[in-house]
Structure formats: structure tokens, C-alpha cells
Amino acid sequence: MNTDPHMRPVAQGNFGKTPFSHILVYLYNKRLGGTLEIREALDRMWPLLTPAQLLHDLFGSKALLKLAARGVLDESEALALFRPRCESVHDVRWTPADVALLDDARDVLGPKPGRNGKIDDADEIRTYGHIVIDEVQDLTPMQLKMATRRSLNGAMTIVRGAIPAELFGRDAYGAINGAMAAPVTVAKAAGPLVAALLFAWLGGYDATVVVLIIIGAVSTAVFMLSTKAASRGRPSTFQ
């Protein structure tokens, strides 16, 4: 059989993350390394793919999509993921929703080793001592997994805008948030002008402050009554 002493050793990524894969890696690197025929057979059976290549192959094949979705999605849902293949994986236009899929595929495949079988430090996932995530209610579970992979010790601060969803539900969440923010934005912009007009009309600070306190109290009461009416009979969103 032909041998090549410069052929790179096989890495863990060729076989995935299973106990059996460790045995295969050991047998190849220690017992069968340099055997061209075996290496070619392994490359055919377990090709060394990047996350982009894996998803490009998956989304570009209806048969693979149906196979991967078996027991999870029905056929119509699986075929909805189909995308025509591009000439090259570098020509694929990934969407923001694909980022979490690419990251999950990378976690399964592992970083692609170099010709010497070693992993380049630049390809390792960078980790952080503490991660702060705002508006976490807008993230999917897979996107949250992306964050946990980058946490060095699991220390994370999770912030979520729960009150609007709790009161008004998740439907049209962005529109509801915008509508709630609009009065505040208008009030901030008009506040100085209104205060100046009140001062000129009332003739002093004391009367102006009293009027502003009354306006604030009435606004708070109206908000409390409207939110109570909106949440009446609605089940809690985050229970």
C-alpha cells in the first residue's frame, strides 16, 4: 500500500464526539497513520466539514432534510427549510437566524484542524468571565446556547423586558413596546416647553411644581387602571 509520511494525523473532528471516536482516532494515529487507502476511505465516510459546508449540504438536499427531521418535523416543515445550492459555500448568503445553527454545528463538529492535526488558537471560541444579555425574551433557546458556550464559568446576568409581555401578551411585542415608549419620548421632548409655559402662566415655581405633581399622579392612576383592565383574565406569560 502507498504511504505518505507527511500526511497529517486525523483529528477528533473527523469522527464526532463519542467514546468510540476516541478509539478510532487512536487506531488511526498510532497504528494506521500514513496509509493512503485508509485515509481516503475515512475522508469518504467521515468528511471533515466546516459548519457552513454542513448546513449548505443539509439545506440543499430535500432527502437530507427529511432524514434529519424524521420524528421532529413533518415533511412540509422540513421541506420549508430547503434552499437551492450555490456553486460554492462561500457564495451562500446566510441570514441572522442561521448564526445560531452555524454555531451549534461548530460545537458538534469541533474546529477544523490544520495539516499537522492541531487546532489554531484563532479558531477556538473566545470565552468571557461574565456575560450580560439584555432583552433575553427576544432570543431563541439555540441563541442562548451560543451565549453559554462563551461563558467561562457560567456567570451570566439575564435581563428581560417581562412587564409588557406579562400585561399584553407576546403578540406584536415590538409594536407594543414602541407604543409604550412613544408617550415617554414625547414627554421628554415637550417637558421643558410645558414647564416654561406653566411657569409663565402661574407666575412661580411653587404652583408649577404642584401642577406637575397632580399631572404625574393622574398619569400613574390612568396607567394602573389601563394595565389592570388589559391583564384581567389573561394567564401569566412567564409562569
Image (spheres, helix red, strand yellow):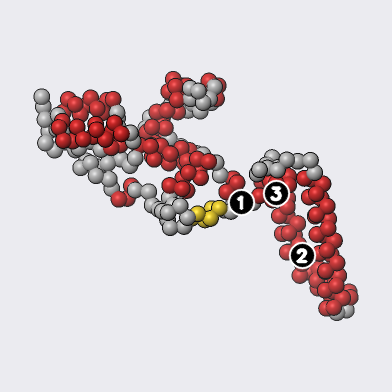
Mark-to-mark CA distance, 3 and 2: 25 Å
Residue 167 appears at what percent x and percent y? 73, 47
> 91 and 13: which one is in front?
13
Q: Is residue 65 left or right of residue 224?
A: left
Please, is residue 176 above or below residue 44 in the view?
below
- State the quadrant of the C terminus: top right
Residue 205, x across and y down, in percent: 83, 78
Mark 1: secondary structure: loop
Residues 133 and 198: in front is: 133
Instruction: Point out the tag, 3 or 2, that comes first from the N-terminus.
Output: 3
Q: Which residue is drawn at the image coordinates 51% and 28% (left, top)?
A: 81
User: Which residue is under mark 1?
Assistant: 160
Which mark is in front, 1 or 2?
A: 1
Give SS at disc 2: helix
Residue in the image at 21% along x and 35% along y: 26
User: Is 161 or 204 nearer to us in this picture?
Assistant: 161
What's the amino acid at mark 1?
Arg
Residue displayed at 34% across by 48% down? 124
Give the residue number, with chain letter if any, for mark 2. Answer: 190
Residue shown at 38% from the left, 52% from the top = 126
Q: Please tell me which of labels 1 and 2 falls first in the chain.
A: 1
Near mark 2 (Cα within 10 A), the count class, few <14, some 14-19 or many ≥20, is: few
Can the viewer see residue 84?
no
> Rounded to the nearest whole Å, what is the CA distance between mark 1 and mark 2?
29 Å
Amino acid type of disc 3?
A: Pro
| Label annotation for residue 95 | none
User: How far apart are the two marked residues, 1 and 3, measured between alpha carbons?
Assistant: 10 Å
Q: Which residue is mark 3?
A: 164
The type of residue carrying mark 2 is Ala
Q: Position of residue 232 (x, y in %)?
A: 80, 44
